[in-house]
Amino acid sequence: MLDKTGLIGSFFGLTKFFFISITYLKRNKK
């Protein structure tokens, strides 16, 4: 059985990293 807290934590960590990389790319395009 998967640990829900660990799964949610890793999910939020990935989303955070995803948004940071997107903002970084948008900043570089200008």
Image: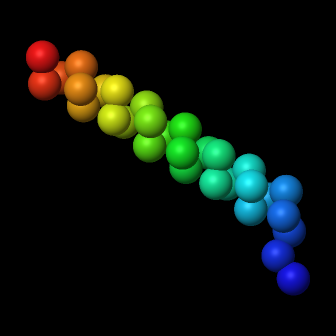
Position in image of residue 18 (x %, y %):
44, 43
- As displayed, is residue 15 above or below residue 27? below
Residue sticking out furthest to the bottom: 1
Position in image of residue 15 (x %, y %):
54, 45
Residue sticking out furthest to the left: 30
For the point 86% across and 68% down, which residue is it? 3
Q: Quadrant of the N terminus?
A: bottom right
- As displayed, is residue 7 above or below residue 12? below
- As displayed, is residue 22 above or below residue 1? above
Image side of residue 2 versus residue 19, left or right: right
For the point 31% across and 27% down, which residue is it? 24
Q: How is the image coloured?
A: rainbow
- The image quadrant of residue 8 is bottom right
Q: Quadrant of the C terminus?
A: top left
- The image quadrant of residue 19 is top left
Image side of residue 4 versus residue 9, left or right: right
For the point 67% across and 54% down, which residue is it? 10
Position in image of residue 11 (x %, y %):
64, 54
Q: How many marks?
A: 0
Image side of residue 7 versus residue 22, left or right: right
